Image: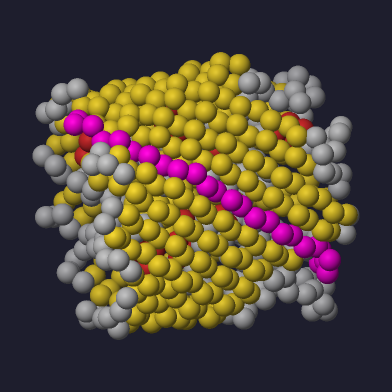
Amino acid sequence: MKKTHLVLTAGILAAGHTAQSQDSTQVSQLNTVVVTATKFNKKQSETGKVLTVIGPQTIGHNTGRTVADVLNEQAGIVIGGAFSNPGKNREVYFRGATSQYTTILMDGIPVADATGLTGNAIDLRFLPIDQVERIEILRGTSTTLYGSDAIAGVINIITKKGGTKPVNVYGDLVYGSNRSLKGSAGLRGKQDNVDYNISFTHFTTDGISEAADTTGTGDFDRDGYTSNGLNATVGIQATENLRLQPFLFFSDYKSSFDGGPFVDSKLNKNKSNALHSGVRAQYDLSKGAIFGNFAYQKVTRDDETDWGKTFTDGRAYYGDLYGHYDITSWFQVMAGAEYRKSELTDTANFKDVKYRTREQHSTSPYVALFLKDLHGFNMELGGRYTLHSQFGNQFTYTINPSYVFSDKFKVFASVASGFKAPTLTSLYSIYGNKDLKAEDAVSYEAGAQTFLFNNKLDLRVVGFRRNIKNQISYINYKYINYNQQKDKGVEVEVIAHPIEKLTVKGFYAYVDGEVTTVGGSGKDTTYSNLIRRPNHTGQIEIGFQATKKLFVSTTVKHTGTRNDLFYKFPRSENVALDPYTMWNAYAEYNLGKARVFFNANNITNNKKYWEIYGYATLGFNMQSGVSFSF
C-alpha cells in the first residue's frame, strides 16, 4: 500500500508541473477576494488562512449532482455516504474530524440542526446545489470568528442573488439512473434599488436498497428519496450606505431506509424539513462597515420504524453584530458580539419526560486585529470570550501570521484554540450523558503556496496538528468523553495549465489520529479512532475546453484503507475496509442561453468495495440534462 500511495502522490505532483487556474474553483490565486477568512472582503495575499473557493463554473459543471458530491472532491474532506443510496445521510469528515466539528454557513450565517443528527451541522441533504453560487472552504480551527463547532473548519455556502437586469429566468431538467429526476426553476433580477432571487428545486429517485443484500435472494427493496427546496432572497438598498437582505430557505425530504447494516426493512420511513430565515444588514462606513445578522432555524424529523414512531423538533436562534474599520492603510480592527440559543423537543428519546423542551444558550464578544501588507507581512490576532449557560466561560484565540514574497510565494502559520459544548442530543437523549464535559481544542498549522512558470503552476502544501481534550464520541450506544484525541495531516494541492485550454488539478491528503483514554485498569490506552476516514486520499482532474462550446473533464479519486465499526449487540466490532478508486467524467455543450450536459459516475462499475460497512454502494450511474438562463 505504501508504494501505491507514493506512486499516486508522484503522479499528482508530476501532473502539476505541466498545468493553472481556469476559474476560482481551484486553489485560490493570491489576489482573489474572499469573505470567509475574516468575515469581510479580503485578498488571499493578505491572510494566512487556508481557503479554497469552488466557483460558479464548477458549480455549473455539477448540475446533476449534489453539494455533498462537490465537497467530496476537495482536499482534506471525505463525505461519508457520498456513493451510497441518495437517501443515506451524508457525514462530513473534515481533516479527520467528524461532522460535529465543522461549521456550515449559508451566506455567512451558521445553519444549525438542534436535532443533533450530525452534531449541530446541517444535514447536507437539505441543500440543493441549484441554489448555490459558490462555496468557500476555510480549513483549520476558526472558533474565534465563528464560535463553537468550528474546530476542523468552516464551509460557507453562498447562494445565488439578484441579476443585473429586471428579469432573468433560469433552471434545469435532469434525468438519471435509478429513475432519478431533478428539475429546478428560478427568477432573479434587479429593478432600481431592489434585487431578488427566487428558486425552487425538486428531486426524486427510486434509489437502491440502502442495506447491502448478501442473502442472494434479491428480496431487498429499493429505498426511494424525494426532496424539495425553496430559496428566496431580496436585497434592498435602503439608503446609499444601508443594505438590507431578508431571506427564507425551506427544504424537505422524505425517504425510506433500512434497519441497519445488511438488514432490510419494508416499513422504515422518514420525513424531515428545515426552515432557515432571517435578515442580513450592512451599513458602509468611509473606511469599513457594520454588519448585523439574525436567523431563526427549525428542523423537524418524523420517523416511523419497526420499533415505533418518533418526532423531533429542533430550533436555533442566531444574532451577530460586528464591524470592521481601517485605522490606517496597514492596520484593521474588527469587533463584534454573537448570541446563540438552541432548543430541542423530543417525544420519544428523552430519558425522563417526553415532550419536554431542553435548551442552552451562549453570548460571545470577540475582537480581531489585522496587520495588512506591511512590506509583505500580514498578521491576525483574535480572541473570543464565550459565556455559556451550562459550561461556564471559555476564552479562545487565533494567532495567524503570513508573509508574501514578490507576489509569487506565501508562507503562513497558525495557532488557534477552540471550544465546543455537548449537543442537546448527547446530553439528554436515551443515549445521552448529563455528565459530559465541554471539549477544548488547540490546532497548529503551517504551509506555503507558490506560483511558478509565469503563473502556470499553483502549488500549496499545508501541515496541521489538532489536539482535542474531553473528546465526545458515541460508543456502544452511549455518549462519553475520551481523555484526548490527537489528529495530524498533510495536504498537497496542485493546479497547472500547460496550454490555454487545458487544466490539470490534483491533491493528496494524509490524515492520522489517535485517542487516549483511561481503561478499566486505570491506565491510559491509545488507539486509532479514524472510523470511516482514510489515512490517504488523492485525486487528479483534467478539464479541456475543446471548443468555445464544448467542455469535457474526467476525474479519478483514490480512497485508501479505513476502519469501520460494525455494531453487533451488545458491542461493536472493528472492520477493515479495502481501498477503492472512482472514475467519473463530464461533458457539456453550450448552446448560448442553454447547455446540455452528461455526467458519468463510477465508469468502471466498481461494486466490490465498502464505503460504509453493510450498506450498498452505487455502481455505474449517470445524469443527463439541460440547463438554461435567459
Magenta residues span 263-287
Indicate whether 362 appears above or below 136: above
Q: Residue at x 62, y 81 (%)?
A: 179
Pinpoint residue 33: horizontal percent, then vertical percent.
Answer: 25, 46
Residue nearer the viewer, 405 or 33: 33
Give residue 407's quadrant in the image: top left
Residue 457, quarter of the rendered image = bottom left
Seen at 44% across and 75% down, the residue is 172
The percent coordinates of residue 507 (x first, y second) are: 37, 54
Residue 598 at x, y percent in the picture: 43, 80
Left or right of 195 on screen, residue 103 = right
The quarter in which the C terminus is drawn is: bottom left
Front position in the image: 572 or 346: 346
Residue 365 can be seen, yes or no: yes
Q: Main secondary structure of the magenta part?
A: strand
Q: Is residue 493 left or right of 129 when viewed as pictured?
A: left
* Residue nearer the viewer, 149 or 14: 149
**Relative to 127, 252 lies left or right:** right
Q: Is residue 203 above or below residue 292?
A: below
Magenta-drawn stretch contains 581: no
* Residue 265 part of the magenta segment: yes
Q: 197 and 558: which one is in front?
A: 197
Q: Residue furthest top?
A: 393
Q: Residue 114 at x, y = what percent?
A: 65, 40
